[in-house]
Image: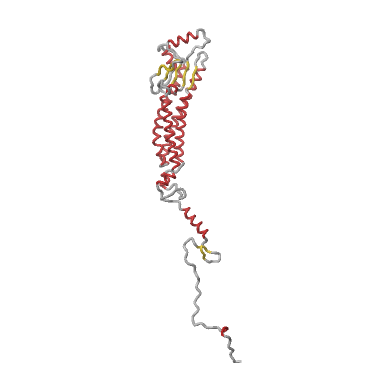
Amino acid sequence: MGKRIDLPSFLRIRKSNSKTAPISEKRSPTLSSGTTWNRPDGVIAPRPESDRASSTSRTASSDTVVTLNEASIKQRTKLRRNFAISGSISYALSVIFLILVIIGNTSNSPVLKDVYFYKLDLTDIIPTSVPNAQLINSIAQSIGLHDFYQVGLWNFCEGYQGQGITFCSTPEKLYWFNPVEVIMNELLAGATIALPTAVITILDVLRITSQIMFGFFITGIVINFIMIFVTPLGVDSRWRSLPLGIVSFISSFLIVGASIVGTVISIAFRIAATAQSDLNIHAEVGTRMFVFMWLASAFTLWGFIVHAGMGCCCVSRRDLRTGRRQINRSVVMLE
């Protein structure tokens, strides 16, 4: 009973003199922010390369506020600058056509003699149905009545068929063509006759509208000439585009208004002249004058559209400097 049984050596429990050390938790080496992630089992593991790359791209895309340089500003404001250049060019072209409108019909030169608002043809003013019509027409021409009269902005010119223009009146400001006065001066040696009230009213309307047209064209060409040089100033700021837009609107109103008045007067003269069945009067409008003044109107309108667009759209230099608009790194190369 009391006999001790010796077990084999490999089954014996060996006693250790050293104390059991506490189990310490193995921690992974410290990783930089954004490179680790918590697995569902609680173990901290390195973040996969794909997740790490997407996190880096998100951080880079959110960093859009960058230091601006002159090259990046020029590239971002390129559209605005191109619009400003087109506006200056359109104003320059409008000035060229307005010059042709203003100096048209002032002399018997190859180009200017064909630039007029309307032309009255009195070659055979007495119809052939009237007895001795040919004799009367010859007498009228012999005492001063010309075959045609054409009207420009500053004066009128007269002449004969086959000879062309023989005389142009002296240019004068706020000019208006009074056909009754011209005919009386040439046929009746300046004598005065009583005119019906309706004719006087028509002449008053013609005088006022012609002088309005004259003033509009002269003022418009002055403004457009100035706008050629000040239009590029709108590239820097929207606030500069505001006053420039107002001035361009005034210019457009003047030029388009003058073109409308000139068109109405010319067409009204043609209708009134051909409506007289007792007289053989023909009238035609000046095609070149119409083309020049409406091209000037179109280019002036484009200048207004440019300033209106720069006032509300297109990035300006001031927008970039103040931070209202930012530059993406993928768009421009920065220093």
Q: Residue furthest bottom?
A: 2
Would you say residue 141 is visible in this rendering? yes
- Tell me which residue sits at (49%, 82%) in the image: 17
Q: Position of residue 118 (x, y in %)?
A: 46, 21
Q: Residue furthest right?
A: 1
Question: Is 298 situated above or below 284?
Answer: below
Q: How many marks?
A: 0
Q: Position of residue 120 (x, y in %)?
A: 47, 18
Is residue 13 shown left or right of residue 177?
right
Question: Is 176 situated above or below 243?
Answer: above
Please state, as top left, top right, bottom left or bottom right, where the N terminus lies in the image: bottom right
> As rendered, which of 9 and 137 lies closer to the eye?
9
Would you say residue 216 is visible in this rendering? no
> As rendered, which of 223 and 158 lies closer to the eye?
158
Q: Colour mode?
A: secondary structure
- Tell me which residue sits at (51%, 60%) in the image: 49
Q: Image quarter for residue 97? A: top left
Q: Position of residue 101 (x, y in %)?
A: 43, 26
Q: Image quarter for residue 224? A: top left
Q: Position of residue 268 (x, y in %)?
A: 49, 21
> As rendered, which of 244 and 55 lies closer to the eye?
55
